[in-house]
Image (cartoon, rainbow, N blue to C red):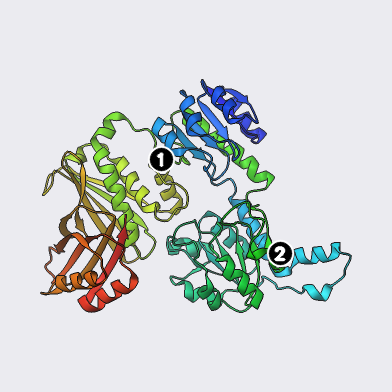
Amino acid sequence: MKILVAEKIADAGIKLLQESGHEVDVLLDLSPEQLIETIPGYHALIVRSATQASAEVIEAGKDLKIIGRAGVGVDNVDVAAATKRGVIVCNAPTSNVVSAAEQTMALMLASARRTPQANASMKAHAWDRGKFSGNELYQKTLAIFGLGRIGGLVAERARSFGMRLVGYDPYCTPERAAHLGVTLFEDIDEILPQADFITVHLPKTKETIGMFGPDQFARMKQGVYLVNTARGGIYDVEALADFVASGKVAGAGIDVYEKEPCTDSPLHAHENIILTPHLGASTKEAQARAGEQIAEYVLLGLEGKMVPTAVNVALVPENVMSAVAPFITACQTCGVILAQLADEAIESVEVRVIGDLAQHDVALLGTATLRGIFSQSSDDPVNLVNAAYIAEQRGVPLTITTDPLRYEYASVVSVVAKAGESTLEVGCTISGHANVMRIVSIFGYRLDLIPRKYILIMKYEDTPGKLGRIGTVLGDANINISTMEIGVSDEGAGEAIVLMNVDDPVPDDVYAKLCSVVGVTDGWFVQL
């Protein structure tokens, strides 16, 4: 097959491609028009960050099977267009993890010892030893927010400096935290007053953007140092600048920004804030690793094998797809719901397939469920190719059990997840020619609801008048209930559960009022 390398990658990567027996052409600096003219006849395209693998390029590449991005992000690849054409898109997400962890340590040390400022002073022909007194890392407390691959590597390195490690990551299991030597906390506010140093390694989500604002800075220890090599915007830059100016934050090392390139911000005015132009992956080793990894993954794709870092849906045999396709989205939705029901990291997942569907190969439904679960906690795209890989990396085992006997429905999929001491369960079926998903059980309570975007779930003691009170509170808040279902446990314990499709999100104060007025024993607001 023919492979087009459109940007410079490591020589070791080129050598791997050539030794595979494929025809490899390295054509650099192609314009968009030239790339569109050149791509026909090629089966694989490898790019870095400059070349745009646009919809037009993908459409022109009639023979394309895979596009490889030699790096972490895939912003320059039209993933939707590739998926539509059945072209696998993959990246090299682990290529820079060591470099990013080392950049974190570099910024931490540079901030604590004021190294850049001292260097600037020396270059100005001064000798101000007393001006640049710093702090040791030894026996200081480092708070790590996000204990994924990079956060874990930072923990290992910080431990060798003799630092005490605390951390926050709702998706990290206690076993992994113990292995890293990190004391886990469930509440951010408990960590902030303890930390001498804080580093963030979190994905960019609606929950993490602005996660550290004025209230959080106010709770931090006097003289704390902050580092961010993850995603811009996790620290509120206006607030950070203010707290550095006040002396509450002694210093910061920032490598990432909400909008890049960033040549001006409130942070630029402060000497105690070290700014670097997104250098986390800028090492020779990371670039070499990216070239080798992407070569390996592209070759796997050309061989028709699983590509562990694929960021879009893999091609599935037609006979399997026709049997399980109606349940793929349903299982993914069950995973999304379970992730939002879990108060702790999900430690294991079981997919129970019951009825006619159990006669088929249902492995894809397990993958779809994992995709839904991890889509709630990953900054990178999660799909039917890489969901199992992510589960393996996070140590979350998946079990699939089948029972071909029919019970109440022709086919049902029940997803059970363990999260700490909790057992979570959501069951679904498909009905009608339009393949409509219906939730038919939750936590073992039987019901029948077609889920919509916003779902309010509440457990309460099953006594008269409760539904009327719920309606009153939501009505006063101008929140409409479109449909609802009440489930009663088979045990008949006197507790009921209600699932309500509502037209708008339920604010915290409205939920608190529901708990007070209705006597809610447990509840969740789920957004699909």
What is the C-alpha distance between the residues marked 2 and 1?
40 Å
What's the mark number on residue 110?
2
Secondary-structure class at tag 1: loop
Q: Which residue is painted at 52% across and 30% down in the image?
A: 299
Residue 296 placement (x, y as % from top left):
54, 34
Residue 149 vs 125, above or below: the answer is: above
Whether residues under marks 2 and 1 lie with C-beta atoms below 8 angstroms apart, the answer is no
Q: Nearer the viewer, residue 438 or 300?
A: 438
Q: How many marks?
A: 2
109 and 162: which is toward the camera: 109
Judge left or right: residue 383 versus residue 119: left
Picture disc at residue 175 = none
Pointer 2 or 1: first along the chain: 2
Front residue (pair 266, 187): 266
Q: Is residue 408 left or right of residue 152?
A: left
Please say whether residue 139 is visible from this viewpoint: no
List the residue tagged with mark 1.
385
Nearest the eye: 219 or 331: 219
Which image quarter holds the C terminus? bottom left
Q: Residue at x 57, y 43 (%)?
A: 71
Locate residue 165, reporting x and y percent: 56, 69
Residue 417 visible:
yes
Q: Position of residue 397 (x, y in %)?
A: 37, 51
Q: Which amino acid does the dot numbered 1 rest on?
A: Val
The amino acid sitting under disc 2 is Ala
